[in-house]
Image (cartoon, helix red, strand yellow):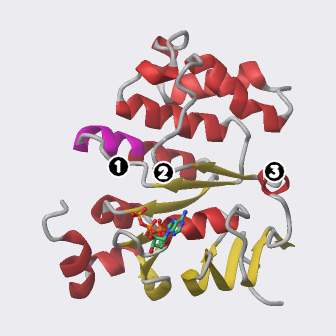
Amino acid sequence: MNARAPLLSVRGVRAGYGGVEALRGVDLDVGDGEIVTLIGANGAGKTTLMMTIFGDPRASAGEIRFDGRDLTKLPTHEIAKLGLAQSPEGRRVFARMSVRENLQMGAMLAGGAHFSQDLERMFAIFPRLKERAGQRGGTLSGGEQQMLAIARALMSRPRLLMLDEPSLGLAPLVARQIFEVLRDLNRDGLSVFLVEQNAFHALSLAHRAYVMVNGEITLSGGGRELLARREVRAAYLEGGL
Ligand code: ATP
């Protein structure tokens, strides 16, 4: 038999906005239990890839499979039910809702049956959220909002967590805490797809990684292997530590 199929498989995917093609034939896999990182400069197409996996924008060519199912024609709300969850760029917590209510929204996909249990788990992972449970999302610090965005995504009990620049705008120490949480979650079995400009931490954490340039994957390999490559260091690390 062949090796097991990856949990997420992206093959020859093209997508764009109107006449502008942002993804120009992307191939990428996330295996079950892996942390996979995608790095690339501003505008390379990283966010577009993450959004295309969720069906908006739609892939104009190629195939995206999750757990063997083709996602390319499913509506976004159906895709979310399959066990993928997203923590989007810019955090986007519900600013007027409390921390607890934000987490309730995240639990809706899981049917709410395990709400109390899952809430306690999130509070154990992010004790700060427990302290702030009744506080409105919009009043949290940037790091706390990032924690809330991740916790909200986890409330749907995903198999694959996709994060778009979770360290953006955070103090280095807070960013490091976020990456440590991702490592722990992965050790407990969660697969992680991480889009980052903070290449040092993201590559250190990743089992495997990809580099995207102008809508194409130009390099892939082990996370630490890419971290050691001169061209990666020159393009994505200098001054970025
Ligand atoms: P960043 O790190 O800045 O988020 P990125 O690698 O995630 O960059 P994308 O945001 O995916 O890159 O952008 C890829 C290309 O698509 C860019 O040329 C961008 O200008 C364009 N683009 C992104 N969103 C839209 C949109 N809603 N409408 C039109 N063009 C867009």
User: Do callouts 1 and 2 mark residues in contact (Cβ within 8 Å)?
Assistant: yes
Say which mark, if any, is on residue 168: 1
| Element at label 3 | helix
221 versus 139 height, above or below: below
Kindly identify the amino acid type of the residue bearing the numbered disc 1: Leu
CA–CA distance in space, label 2 to label 3: 19 Å
Extent of the magenta region: 172-178
* In the rendered image, the vertical position of residue 106 relative to residue 11, given as above or below: above
Quadrant that contains the N terminus: bottom right
| Label 2 CB sits under 8 Å from any ligand 1 atom | yes
Crowdedness near tag 2: few (<14), some (14–19) or many (≥20) residues, C-alpha within 10 Å:
some
Q: Which residue is drawn at the image coordinates 72% and 69% (left, top)?
A: 7
* 144 shown above or below 30: above
Residue beneath disc 3: 77
Assess mark 3: CB under 8 A from ligand 1? Answer: no
Marks 1 and 2, Cα distance to the nearest angstrom? Answer: 8 Å
Magenta segment main secondary structure: helix
Q: Circle 2 is placed at which residue position?
A: 89
